[in-house]
Image (tube, helix red, strand yellow):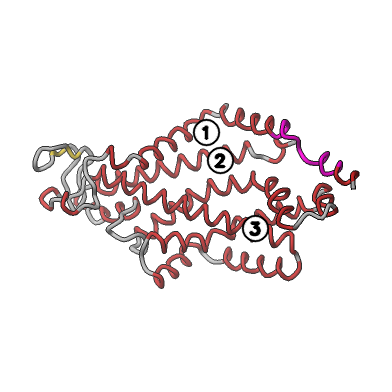
Amino acid sequence: MSLITRQVTSTSASPRREHSIWCRMAADFARSRIALAGLLLLAAVLLVALVAPWITPQNPYDLMQLDVLDARLPPGSPQGSGQYTYWLGTDGQGRDLYSAIVYGLRISLLVGVGSAAVAAVVGTLMGLLAAYAGGRIDALIMRLVDLLLSFPTLLMALMILAWTGKGVGNVVLTLVLLEWAYYARTARGQALVEARRDYVEAARGLGLPDWRILLGHILPNCLPPLLVIGALQVARAITLEATLSFLGLGVPITEPSLGLLISNGYQYLLSNEYWISVFPGLALLATIVAINLVGDQLRDVLNPRLMK
């Protein structure tokens, strides 16, 4: 028993070595100017979304604050009562476009981060279960993953939302159902590699329960690629939500996201009222670019070769 215990100790990384690895990865991340620019832009986007009620002159959800006479005003137009200026103009409902973008950003981030987080938990657990259990359970889970990944994501999302209806909760649930397969496939591949290592065999020899081996020994070594997928899936979920809302099957008009704001202004483009769609589109583009820049750098930093 003492020999097995020494084997587990020797094959597991010491806290000091793990700390040095993460410090080295943080230093590699900080050396990339592009990654820092993306991180700063992402931090600014998150901060703006969090403090939305305090930095916007209007609540776009409050019908009492809207005036139809202020509809489709160009950027820089004064508000009817002269209380403030519509620096980005107004949309077809008379909402201050700046306020609508900031509040819409909150909805987009909520859908993107929420769906990616839930899908990551579900997919990771399913992948670990498939790799550790093997046999019929592994075959069943992976056939389900292959089935989900074989169909176009947007088409399946349209079919599900046509049945469930609009709503933030329905959009999040739909994206979770379509995204967990990416995490499951990656987690299974990593777990199959880790399950053959000596420290896992030693842990089994010690009589540790399966859940402790999975969560305490195998899962930490599967996290690097899952973190990269998680960052990129947030951007993908935001894009999918914007596309669904643009097509009229995403969030309701009472809780407009950036995609719905773009859709609302699409009909006015030919009348040269560009700002109703262009400014929400630029906000959506900046958000996705910031997330992708951070995700790309994470992929480089968390390269398995750097973990040696």
* Residue 145 horizontal/vertical position (percent): 62, 64
> In the picture, residue 227 is in which quadrant?
top right
Q: Secondary structure at mark 2?
A: helix
Q: Which is nearer the N-term, disc 2 or disc 3?
A: 3
Left or right: 116, with 183 as reference point? left
Sequence-first disc among 1 and 3: 1
Is residue 212 shown in magenta? no
Q: Nearer the viewer, residue 300 or 212?
A: 212
> Which comes before the other along the chain, label 1 or label 2?
1
Q: Which mark is residue 35?
A: 1
Measured along the vertical axis of the image, is residue 248 above or below residue 193?
Answer: below
Verify CB contact (< 8 Å) between mark 1 and mark 2.
yes
User: Which residue in the structure is indicated by mark 3?
Assistant: 185
Compared across the picture, whether 106 is left or right of 135 comes to left
* Amino acid beneath label 1: Ala
**Neighbourhood count class around disc 3 (C-alpha, 10 Å): few under 14, some 14–19, many 20 upward:** many
Image quadrant in which the C terminus is located: top right
* Residue 174 higher or lower than 219, as above or below: below
Residue at the spot x=58%, y=39% of the render?
A: 298
Magenta residues, as a range?
6-18
x, y percentage for residue 294?
52, 38
User: At 72% across and 34% down in the image, what residue appears?
Assistant: 15
Residue drawn at x 27%, y 54% is: 266
Numbered circle sitting on residue 296: 2
**Side of 144 where 169 appears, left or right:** left
- Residue type at the position of mark 2: Asp
Residue 16 located within the stretch drawn in magenta: yes
The disc at residue 153 is: none
Q: Is residue 225 rendered to the left or right of residue 75?
A: right
Query: Residue 243: percent from the left, percent from the top?
Result: 39, 57
Outermost residue to the left? 81
